[in-house]
Image: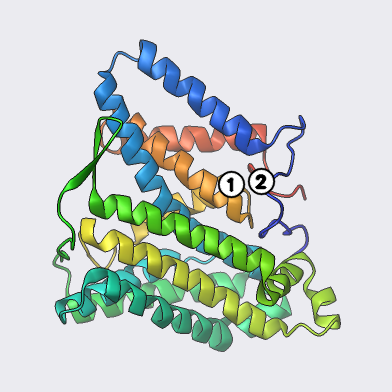
Amino acid sequence: MSGVTSVATNSKRPSVSGINPGVLVVGAIVVVMALIYLVGGKDQGLVTQAVVSGLLLGGVYALISVGLTLIFGVLGIVNFAQGAMLTMSMYIVYALSTAGLPVYVATIIAVPLMFVFGVIVQASLLTKLTISGSHDGPLLVTLGLSLLIINVLLMIFGGRPKDVEAPIDGSLSILGAVASWPRVIAFVGAALVAVALTAVLKRTPLGLSIRAVASNSEGAKLVGVDIGRVYALTFGIGAACVAVAGGLMTPFTSLTPSVGEQFTILAFIIVVLGGLGSVVGAMLGGLVIGLVQTVGALYLPGTGSLILVFAVFVLVLFLKPEGLYGARR
């Protein structure tokens, strides 16, 4: 757990040059976007639409990644089941919606259900391995859990794509771009949850315990912190984050048992890009990747935009190997 101290730490950590990494990234984005508008050869309205869509998508990416980076920052576990847990939350929302509940009410119900699921998984399967310092064990357990969740969902719901009707029709005009209300609500919900999570980590006794364990688990144990309880609650919070993301995404995402896997690789990229264990880094990384993916699709349609995502990822790691807000090891 050594070196993973960036969970909910001061977002104003300077870079090597003394400038906040977030300021550098925002500045670089502004310059690139100005060049695209001026000499990119694309219709400005089309570029604006891509920017708005990218920011809305990036907000959801950020929420998925926040749960992943929180789990890593405290437990030191790379959770390979994150995508499957996202899928599980989406199917819970789907099942509750088909039972007659509005989709956002179903999301509110899914959050505590996924929190309890995360607590049980950590307490029953991972705590002993985590405390013992095992690295391979948790990886294999979360990988096996991912396969189990996907196959159980396949057995229960089948492989045919399923949809949930959006509760609000219509769209919102943002700087001339069109954004559907479900996507706007997803972005706002993700932002609110991210802010609330940051406040919990910085201003509550639980947050203090989580930060203490992330910084030095043995030292936290010596001063009376229940390590097993903190581990279980942290994994539960990570699961709750993907439940919010899953519920907010359900109205505009086609559901299949493997739908969450497409977000797993992107979530890992965002976490490493932002800095392992950094909540602020995950939020910023999510927005950056969302922008790169949608604006890049103007020049490299289809899956070609992923080439740009990986290029940005490699470039950042080359310039700052620990990530934007990661601690040097």
Above or below: residue 179 compared with residue 4: above
Disc number placed over residue 274 in the picture, else none: 1
Disc number placed over residue 325 in the picture, else none: 2
Identify which residue, 124 or 249, lies in the foreground. 249
Residue 47 image-quadrant placement: top left
Dot 1 amino acid type: Gly
Q: Residues within 10 Å of mark 2 (few under 14, many from 20)?
A: many
Q: Is residue 259 visible?
A: no
Q: Residues within 10 Å of mark 1 (few under 14, many from 20)?
A: many
Q: Residue at x 59, y 46 (%)?
A: 274
In the rendered image, residue 58, in percent from the top left (x then y), is placed at: 41, 46
Above or below: residue 7 compared with residue 281: below
User: Are discs 1 and 2 less than 8 Å apart at CB?
Assistant: yes
Left or right: 105, with 263 as reference point: left
Q: Residue at x 36, y 45 (%)?
A: 56
Left or right: 181, with 24 as reference point: left
In the rendered image, residue 209, in percent from the top left (x then y), is placed at: 72, 75
Left or right: 124, with 251 as reference point: right
In the rendered image, residue 281, in percent from the top left (x then y), is placed at: 59, 48
Q: Residue at x 48, y 65 (%)?
A: 80
Identify which residue, 105 or 291, lies in the foreground. 105
- Upstream in sequence: badge 1 or badge 2: 1
Residue 122 image-quadrant placement: bottom right
Q: Residue at x 59, y 74 (%)?
A: 234
Dot 2 amino acid type: Tyr
Residue ranking furthest to the top: 39
How was this image coloured? rainbow
Q: Secondary structure at mark 1?
A: helix
Q: How far apart in space, not on screen, are marks 1 and 2 (Cα)?
A: 6 Å
